[in-house]
Image (cartoon, grey):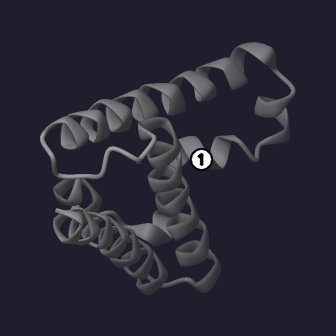
Amino acid sequence: MKRYLSWPRLGTRGCRVGRMTQDPEVVTDAELIAVVANAFDTMLNHWERAITAAIAAGELPTSIVPADLARTLAAVLQGGYVLARAQGEQGPMDAAVRGAISLLDAAQSALRTDH
């Protein structure tokens, strides 16, 4: 998960799929918004499987709800894109990713101290 989060992404370019959620023509077209929703669902399913595997491997606490954490990580990345575009610089995206990784590290650390 951390490797995927750390994958270089140009925050100032934004997310093409995420941007489509703000397009009035997409939002009002049932077929188009379904395509966008499906793209996000596919990404979330990948995250959920990775999180479930990390929990099963003892890398994350069993108290974590994979669907919730998947949506949190997706929101962090989408928010990073929005902040980077708003400020016209990469820094906000990089900071959002570092923050998400820090949260995962804290969850792992808490798991180690509980045992």
Q: Residues within 10 Å of mark 1 (few under 14, many from 20)?
A: some
Which residue appears at 60% of the width and 67% of the height? 82
- State the residue lying farthest toward the top: 31
Q: Is residue 94 left or right of residue 33?
A: left
Return the x and y of residue 58 as percentages of the image width and height: 15, 46
Corner quadrant of residue 42: top left
Corner quadrant of residue 70: top left
Please name whichever residue, 67 or 77, is drawn nearer the observer in this view of the structure: 67
Corner quadrant of residue 105: bottom left
- State the residue lying farthest toward the front: 115
Q: Is residue 113 left or right of residue 70?
A: left
Return the x and y of residue 61 as percentages of the image width and height: 30, 51
Work out whether residue 68 can be spotted: yes
Which residue appears at 60% of the width and 85% of the height? 87
Return the x and y of residue 24 as percentages of the image width and height: 85, 39
Which residue appears at 50% of the width and 62% of the height? 76
Work out whether residue 14 can be spotted: no
Q: Is residue 54 left or right of residue 90?
A: left
Quadrant of image for the C terminus = bottom left
Please name whichever residue, 97 or 9, is drawn nearer the observer in this view of the structure: 97
Which residue appears at 59% of the width and 47% of the height? 18
Q: Secondary structure at mark 1?
A: helix
Return the x and y of residue 90 as percentages of the image width and height: 42, 81
Label 1, on which residue? Answer: 18
Please name whichever residue, 7 or 72, is drawn nearer the observer in this view of the structure: 72
